[in-house]
Each structure stands twice: as C-alpha cells, then as structure tokens.
Image (cartoon, rainbow, N blue to C red):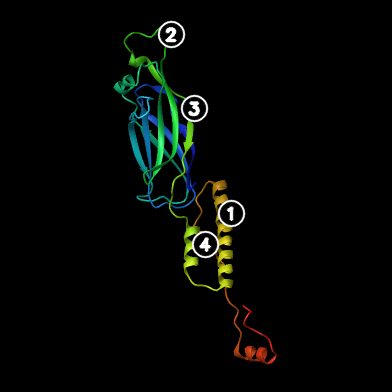
Amino acid sequence: MVCKITDVKVLREVAAVDEDLGFQVTMDVAEPLAEDIVFRCMFVVSPEAGSDDVELDSADIGNGPGIQAGLMRFVFEAPAPTRRQIEESGSVADTTAVYLTATYKGEEFCRIGYYVRHEYVEPLLQENPPEEVDWAMLRRVLSNPCVTRFPIEWDMPQSESKIVDSEDMPQSESKIVHSEEMIKSEAITCSTAWRQFNNDGQPLPGGSMNVSGQLRERSRSPAAKRAAVEAGIDLTNDS
C-alpha cells in the first residue's frame, strides 16, 4: 500500500455531547502522490443498509495537489452530530457510530470506525433517565477503533515506470541485464534509506533518492586494439 494510516488517536474519548470530535492522524506515504488525500468524518444515522450517513466535515490533506513521501501527522477536527441527528438515529441511549474515511482519487482505502454511546454524567440519571433528554448532563463516549483497509489503484510507482521505459527502448541483451541490475540496486538503496527515515522519524535531506553509480564501457586506444588484432584476440565479446 502506497499510503497507510499507521495511527489515529482520539483527542477526547469522553466529552460533552456537543463538543467537537478531534483525531490526531499519522500517515505513512511510501511514494510521492500526484493528488491530495481526502479525509471525511461521517455519522451513522441509521444502521440500515442503503441509508445515507451524514458528513460532519472533510479535509484535503496534501500540498495542493500532491503529497511528498514520508511520515505526516495532523489533527482533524469535526463538529459533533447535532441533537436532531442523534435523535433521528434512535433513542439517546442507543449506540450509534462515527467513522473516518480516507480516499484517493475518489477511492476509499481506509476506514476507522468508532461506536458512540451517550450516557448521563450522574449515575442516578443513568439508571433512571428522565423522559425529556437533559442534554447538559449527557456526555459522549467513543469505543476502541475498528480499522478496515481497501485495495485501490494508486499512481504508477517510479520503479515500474522505469521498467516500462527500459522495455520500450531497443537495447542489446547485455545492456538489458545491466539495466535490470541497476533497477535492483536502486530498489535496495531506496529501501535502506526508507528504513533510516522511519527509525529517525525525520525526512531525509535532499528529497529524492538516486543511484550514484553509472555503467561505463571500457575504451582502448587504437594502438592497443591493433596489438590485440595482431595477437589474434577477439574483442567483439569484451565489454
């Protein structure tokens, strides 16, 4: 997966019923992305299939557009469901749900859901709730998260695009072997650099990572070539 949600922390697991929802999201982007990632906070009004969930808020995450490779941490806040929406979902005592959804180019790749219950602060009110809801005495409690990931089509990785370019160009068999070795070498170099990034928790200096070595054919002087021919040495298979 090119982009993975590695951690989500609820800023206020227990809060007043009207208080905003807050989440600290950590995102691991393995390769640069061409477009932003869209986060939405949704409230489940009805668990019935086919019902429309309510969008509480949304945010575009990126550099407008696009995202650089690396770790990204941000806070996403959304207004709480309105009292009317809570009542439409059933009794205040019923368990409802909210979830965060992350999409790229319109395709959802991750969903983090929470069960939500509303309870009275006072134990006596919780045991014997009043007929008319006392909203001032209610608090919202979120459960542990439930994470679901979905496979989607991301941008073409740089390694794949290089392989396509090398196949399109007419090359000798020996040069194709060298090209494949360079690609393998580049993959190892990027993998090592990425592990260093994750351990340090800081972006690598210089941005992109490239292979420093280059393949060069050995050259001989005309005198050396004439001497080899006179000695009967075949230079056609020597690179």
Q: Residues within 10 Å of mark 1 (few under 14, many from 20)?
A: few
**Image position of 33 with respect to 124: above or below:** below
Q: Alpha-carbon neighbours of circle 3 within 10 Å: few (<14), some, or many (≥20)?
A: few
Position of residue 9 relative to residue 225, above or below, is above
Q: What secondary structure is marked by label 4?
A: loop
Whether residue 208 is visible, yes or no, is no
Can you give x and y, in whole percent of width and height, for residue 50 in the image? Answer: 35, 30
Determine the secondary structure under disc 2. Answer: helix
Q: Position of residue 119 (x, y in %)?
A: 41, 16
Q: Which residue is mark 1?
A: 192
Residue 49 in the image: x percent, y percent?
A: 37, 28
User: Looking at the image, which residue is at 44% across and 10% down?
Assistant: 123
How far apart are the two marked residues, 3 and 1, measured between alpha carbons? 34 Å
Task: Name the residue that disc number 3 marks.
Answer: 144
- The kind of residue tagged 1 is Thr
For mark 4, what is the residue?
A: 210
Identity, as a three-letter code, of the amino acid under mark 2: Glu
Disc 3 to disc 2, C-alpha distance: 24 Å
State the residue at coordinates (62%, 82%).
236
Q: Which mark is residue 127?
A: 2
Q: Secondary structure at mark 3?
A: loop
Residue shown at 57% from the left, 58% from the top:
189
Looking at marks 1 and 4 on the same chain, the residue that comes earlier in the sequence is marked by 1
